[in-house]
Amino acid sequence: MKITNICCIGAGYVGGPTMAIIAQKCPHINVTVVDINEKRIAAWNDEDVNNIPIYEPGLSDIVKEARGRNLFFSTKVDEAIDKAEMIFISVNTPTKTYGIGKGMAADLKFIELCARQIARVSKTDKIVVEKSTLPVRTAEALKNILENTGNGVNFQILSNPEFLAEGTAVEDLLAPDRVLIGGDIDTEKGREAVNALVSVYANWVTKEHILTTNVWSSELSKLTANAFLAQRVSSINAMSELCEKTGADVNEVAKAVGMDSRIGSKFLQSSVGFGGSCFQKDILNLVYIAKSFGLNEVADYWEQVIILNNHQKRRFAANIVKTLFNTVSGKKIAILGWAFKKDTNDTRESAAIYVSDYLLNEQAEIVVYDPKVTAEQIYEDLDYLGTRTDSENRSLVKVVNTAEEACGNSHAVAVLTEWDEFKNLDWQQIYENMLKPAFLFDGRRLLNKAELKKVGFEVFVIGS
Ligand SMILES: NC(=O)C1=CN([C@@H]2O[C@H](COP(=O)(O)OP(=O)(O)OC[C@H]3O[C@@H](n4cnc5c(N)ncnc54)[C@H](O)[C@@H]3O)[C@@H](O)[C@H]2O)C=CC1
Ligand SMILES: O=C(O)[C@H]1O[C@H](OP(=O)(O)OP(=O)(O)OC[C@H]2O[C@@H](n3ccc(=O)[nH]c3=O)[C@H](O)[C@@H]2O)[C@H](O)[C@@H](O)[C@@H]1O
């Protein structure tokens, strides 16, 4: 089957970059990314390509190249579905905040809405691709909705989870470790659909890197990959606490351990705790699925990754309070970095939110600087927690435009995102403008501890 029109529902952190690359690499395919969020679509269409809604190194150039040629952003969802032979569903699948499975299960209401809309609009056969991260066996529910509410056309459902990491989305998409495609390989039509998607990726990904499996393996592999990655971070973070007690250094331990080729060196960077929209959500979902099959030991095993991560964030914040003579009440604390990692403007589940909330509960005054996150977003993140009123957040938290401004007259500085620019700050000058003793808490192991100590800082580095 030849694909000439692709529609992607959801113009977010996955839909936007993924479709931009497909459009760039497949000039013969028209790619339309649709979303119900008008503001987001307007930003994707902004004349100044630097204003696209997602900051990712290299992305704006690709959008510039393909937009208007064969890459389109639109709010006309029905129209794009109707035209396309292949429809990617790339909508959000957050943790449920209500009802059965609250706080654990993935909320699939947006997925179901997409399925119903696709069924209602489609007048020709469609290949429907699950790009969102979904619980294993979601394709079954999708098929049920599509077949029972559709117009009698044939729907093939594929699972094609996305493995890109934010901040490196473009390079990950251009040279993926693997592309995973799950389909109904036992039927002729299923194999045809799988091959159609393989041939899209084959425009830039070698065949050896395209893996095809059954649908359930593909769905479950995505949750498994995120669980394994997050587990490594929690494992090294668990050791970071032990390092602090014993005089071992977590970077040295990570290096020694990672040089064992059976273990490998990646994802062993100790931190204030992992954030991001997916690790926590996907593991909670995995725990929920395991529990729903009565697999309590499996559920408990994975839940510990989250428990340890919450502990890491809390103990980092608690250590600030303890070190500042057991009180931060009325003290000014500078927070450097709000994004959940460098090179992204995404703040979802960022450790900075939780550390700040903890310090605010201890009556600290917070001043935040992040090179890519807006003040509006920072307040929204704190308001969402519901710990205090919106106006209290605005009076206790100040957002400024430079790191120097954030640190001036502060009692302590906490580095919570590993932005490169923090390495090159004039730390001598910052020290001089702070209250003494000047405390510095490096939650990312980003800075040179020995040099900062020489400047005069009292330095605390996670894991040493
Ligand atoms: N953010 C990431 O780095 C990665 C995310 N994923 C998965 O991809 C999925 C999407 O994630 P993000 O792109 O981060 O989410 P996002 O929240 O940035 O984007 C989702 C978009 O879908 C739109 N949407 C929701 N329902 C819609 C509907 N019925 N019709 C049209 N548009 C609709 C929303 O308005 C939103 O703009 C999730 O399942 C996530 O787990 C997978 C790999 C990486
Ligand atoms: O499903 C998803 O959403 C994606 O989740 C992660 O990507 P992402 O969350 O964007 O970024 P990561 O680089 O994985 O970092 C996640 C968090 O872990 C932290 N981290 C990562 C690595 C490490 O060694 N130490 C560490 O603390 C990061 O600072 C960040 O807060 C996975 O890496 C992607 O493969 C996956 O597609």
Image (tube, grey):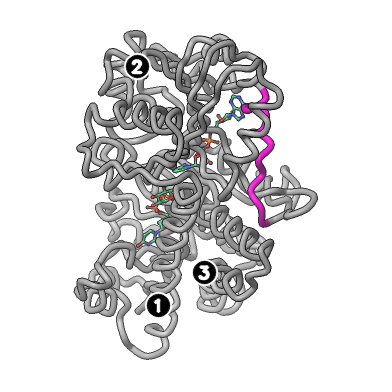
Residue type indicated by callout 1? Ser
CB under 8 Å between callouts 2 and 1? no
Disc sitting over residue 305 in the figure? 3
Residue at 61% x, 21% y: name it.
Answer: 118
Question: Is disc 3 placed on a helix, strand or loop?
Answer: helix
Would you say the magenta stretch is mainly helix, strand or loop? Answer: helix
Residue 441 visible (yes or no): no
Q: Earlier in the sequence, mark 3 or mark 1?
A: 1
Figure check: 62 above or below 317? above
Front-most of residues 125 and 286: 125
Magenta residue check for 108: yes
Count every numbered label the image shows and give the total: 3
What residue would you read off at disc 2? Answer: 2
Check the image and name the residue furthest to the right: 99
Magenta region, residue range: 104-116
Quarter of the image containing the N terminus?
Answer: top left
Residue type indicated by callout 3? Val
- How far apart in space, not on screen, are marks 3 and 1 (Cα)? 14 Å
**Mark 3 Cβ and ligand 2 under 8 Å apart:** no
- How far apart in space, not on screen, are marks 3 and 2 (Cα)? 44 Å
Q: Earlier in the sequence, mark 3 or mark 2?
A: 2
Figure check: 304 above or below 133? below
What residue would you read off at disc 1? Answer: 240
Mark 2 or 1: the one toward you: 2
CB under 8 Å between callouts 3 and 2? no
Mark 3 or 2: the one toward you: 2
Magenta residue check for 64: no
Residue at 46% x, 35% y: name it.
Answer: 187
